[in-house]
Image: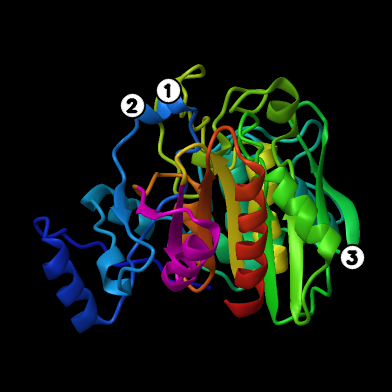
């Protein structure tokens, strides 16, 4: 389990030369890096500007400066759900608590429809579960409590359904290779339903098979409702790439980056969260459109530069968006080589081919 960053007061902005010197002296390549905007061209124009880094630049030049708010949020991302949380994650916690209570006491403290809101009863039941299992009895579900409550996916080679979307569509995962391999790469094709240009890349690597010592876990459409409708959001108008642990409230349904009512409130983001727990990936790549760049998180700086060189896309430092899968992974799982790849719109065949090459190289050499 990875420990979160200690909150600090960020220094005044430094020049690139000064940032490189500081990184070299401290021995770090990055602090926290966010997931992708993944926006349409019009939305991207109104998004915060990204800092470009050439693919050949030294590692220290790609240091990410983080706001005090982002650091503070990163420190709190051990909490998966707590009083006031809503949605899919609360329902699954309720389901797991019922199973535990039946095993221990012969009956559940809650019956009927699964809970949708984390209220006083859920808090009391979680606290009792934690006490029974030698955990700190806070009444909030942190990552350790969640791991004990919820079993991981039992995956096997081939395609399988791991969850259902808001509308009940299957969320499928395709395993190519042996999950006992030392290198396990999760690849997400279309988390935003109107940004699906990465799907041919997933199809191509699956057809060619996994290199020796590598397993691919391919999630083509984790947002099947959005893909069916051709929209960025899921069926509840939530931007799933703002709905992960580290979530903060912003806007209402209809806002392009609406993050939902709470972290992991949506079954689709919860499925990806549980997939990471199950696979324990060594690398994680997600495709978006249309900023045409490669962003990275955690330990992904070196592989980002190599991926950029092979794909022909520049490395760009994007902001650390609260609740994105990249920010969550970079904060809680910094040893995972996490890349957000922004393709163009439209995508020429040559770009698909180069990204297939880059992905296979990453899988083998990360």
Do callouts 2 and 1 mark residues in contact (Cβ within 8 Å)?
A: yes
Q: Of residues 345 and 141, which is closer to you in this image? A: 345
**Residue 42 numbered tag:** 1
Q: Which residue is depicted at the point 62% across and 29% down?
A: 194
Above-or-below relation of 315 to 176:
above
Above-or-below relation of 13 to 190:
below
In the rendered structure, the answer to whether residue 70 lies left or right of residue 322 reads: left
Residue 317 visible to an observer of this rendering: yes
Q: Dot 2: few (<14), some (14–19), or many (≥20) neighbours within 10 Å?
A: few
Q: Which residue is depicted at the point 45% across and 27% down?
A: 41
At numbered mark 1, what does the secondary structure look like: helix, strand or loop? helix
Do callouts 1 and 3 mark residues in contact (Cβ within 8 Å)?
A: no
Q: Is residue 314 magenta?
A: yes
- The span shown in magenta is 293-318
| Of pointers 1 and 3, the one earlier in the residue sequence | 1
Q: Which residue is depicted at the point 19% across and 83% down?
A: 25
Residue to which mark 2 is pinned: 46
At numbered mark 3, what does the secondary structure look like: helix, strand or loop? loop
At numbered mark 2, what does the secondary structure look like: helix, strand or loop? loop
Residue 152: give x, y in percent of width and height.
76, 62
Quote the CA–CA distance across marks 2 and 1.
7 Å
Q: Dot 3: few (<14), some (14–19), or many (≥20) neighbours within 10 Å?
A: some
**Residue 157 numbered tag:** 3
Pair 1/3: label in front: 1
Q: Is residue 206 magenta?
A: no
Residue 196: give x, y in percent of width and height.
66, 37
């Amino acid at each position: 389990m990875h420990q979160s960053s200690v909150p600090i007061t960020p220094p005044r902005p430094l020049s690139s030369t000064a940032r490189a010197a500081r990184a070299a002296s401290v021995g770090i390549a990055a602090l926290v890096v966010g997931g992708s905007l993944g926006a349409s061209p019009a939305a991207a124009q109104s998004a915060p500007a990204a800092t470009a880094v050439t693919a050949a630049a030294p590692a220290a030049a790609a240091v990410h400066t983080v706001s005090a708010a982002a650091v503070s949020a990163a420190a709190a991302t051990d909490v998966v759900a707590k009083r006031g949380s809503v949605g899919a994650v609360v329902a699954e916690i309720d389901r797991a608590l019922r199973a535990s209570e039946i095993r221990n006491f012969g009956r559940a403290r809650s019956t009927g429809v699964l809970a949708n809101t984390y209220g006083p009863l859920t808090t009391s039941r979680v606290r009792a579960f934690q006490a029974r299992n030698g955990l700190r009895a806070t009444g909030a579900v942190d990552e350790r409590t969640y791991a004990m409550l919820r079993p991981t996916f039992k995956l096997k080679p081939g395609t399988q359904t791991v969850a259902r979307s808001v509308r009940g569509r299957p969320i499928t995962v395709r395993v190519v290779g042996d999950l006992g391999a030392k290198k396990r790469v999760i690849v997400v094709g279309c988390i935003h339903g109107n940004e699906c240009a990465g799907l041919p890349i997933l199809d191509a690597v699956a057809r060619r098979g996994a290199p020796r010592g590598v397993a691919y876990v391919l999630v083509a459409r984790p947002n099947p409702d959005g893909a069916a409708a051709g929209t960025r959001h899921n069926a509840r108008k939530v931007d799933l790439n703002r709905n992960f642990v580290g979530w903060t409230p912003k806007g209402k349904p209809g806002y392009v980056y609406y993050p939902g009512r709470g972290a992991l409130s949506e079954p689709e983001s919860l499925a990806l969260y549980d997939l990471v727990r199950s696979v324990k990936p060594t690398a994680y790549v997600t495709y978006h459109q249309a900023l045409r760049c490669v962003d990275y998180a955690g330990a992904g700086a070196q592989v980002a530069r190599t991926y950029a060189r092979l794909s022909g896309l520049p490395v760009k430092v994007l902001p650390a968006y609260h609740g994105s899968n990249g920010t969550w992974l970079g904060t809680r799982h910094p040893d995972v080589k996490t890349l957000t790849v922004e393709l163009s719109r439209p995508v020429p065949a040559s770009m698909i081919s180069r990204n297939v090459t880059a992905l296979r190289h990453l899988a083998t050499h990360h």
